[in-house]
Image: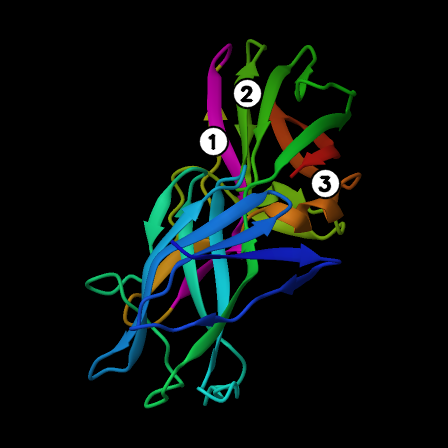
Amino acid sequence: MRKVKISIVTGVFILLFFNLIANAWGDIIITMEKGSFILKNLSFSSNVIGPYFKGDVLNNTSKDWNRVIFEVDFYDSSGNRIENTYGGSSKFAIFDLKKGETKRIGDAIGGMEYMFGIEGAIVSKYQIRFRNGEYPAKYIFVMTKPKENRELLFEDDFLRILFSISEMEIEFLLHNQTSNPIRIDWDQVSYVDVSSESHKVMHSGVKYIDREKPQAPTVLPPTAKLKDIIFPTDYVFYTSGKYGKWSRNPLFPDSTKAELYKGKSFSVFIPFEINGVIKNYFFTFNIEDVEI
């Protein structure tokens, strides 16, 4: 089996051309810092819709990828690049690719990835490369206010609250340590991001479509516990179209962009009403480190 090894030199992918023989291509190994991707069983063909790729991608890196994007350039028998009518290179993506896992290229029936924009072209050679991708980063959080605590825990005579923070949301477990109820007015709670911008929040049980409406307060009885989440309402959005759906932007980014957040701080402001008196709590967290 014939292979082409593709390496990174000073951040630039140096690629070799590989001849198209009977529409079947050998394996391609794309080597990078985190390991490699192996593109296997590649073939290129066409039908009434247009030209398409078939094949598989093996994740031989050390990461679980949320998304991987590859770029493809096509060339004729004279070595001239076939211009894409949409401009730039053709692309295809693989989603949710775990380390050691192999996934089929393309979501269409038969695992086809259509290369729109080069319809009718006679392809003799190709150039393929890794464009970009996203994989989860590991954030190390430390509470700095009201008191520094590496376990993200705060406790006083009134309450005990333990936070659990992920890229997608802030979860907390609240324990009422008084003989009086604790009331949370959610319309007064806010999330302050790493840029010091304040955001209205939503919590468990609130529908996305109702996120901007007034939220009913939560009353926590004496000595009781409450498990809930905090998430900014303006991070929620609806994607329109035939397959429209609700989605959320993460609080913190994946992969290499995560490094930009190292050393930054963010906060959660929660006013608790205890025995008729409002006590303001401002919980601040620092992103001590990011592992990618």
Please state, as top left, top right, bottom left or bottom right, where the C terminus lies in the image.
top right
- Residues shaded magenta: 222-239
Q: Residue 238, relative to residue 141: is it above or below?
A: below
**How packed is label 3: few (under 14 Cα within 10 Å), some, or many (20 or more)?**
some
Disc 3 versus disc 1: distance between alpha carbons? 24 Å
Mark 2 element type: strand
Residue 15, percent from left and from top: 59, 66
Residue 254, percent from left and from top: 59, 47
* Total labels drawn: 3
**How packed is label 2: few (under 14 Cα within 10 Å), some, or many (20 or more)?**
some
The amino acid pointed to by label 3 is Phe
Residue pointed to by mark 1: 218
Residue pointed to by mark 3: 266
Identify the residue at horizontal 58%, vertical 50% (top origin).
31
Q: Quadrant of residue 269?
A: top right
Q: Residue 171, relative to residue 193: is it above or below?
A: above
Q: Nearer the viewer, residue 78 or 288?
A: 78
Res 260 label: none
Residue 276: in sight, yes or no? Answer: no
Left or right? Give the position of 139 relative to 195: left
Identify the residue at horizontal 24%, vertical 82% (top origin).
49
Residue pointed to by mark 2: 174
Residue 220, percent from left and from top: 48, 22
Left or right? Give the position of 24 relative to 187: left
Q: Nearer the viewer, mark 3 or mark 1?
A: 3
Q: Nearer the viewer, residue 75 or 280?
A: 75
Mark 1 element type: strand
Q: Earlier in the sequence, mark 3 or mark 1?
A: 1
Is 12 covered by the magenta stretch? no
Q: Quadrant of residue 143?
A: top right
Identify the residue at horizontal 80%, vertical 38% (top origin).
263
Q: Nearer the viewer, residue 133 or 198?
A: 133
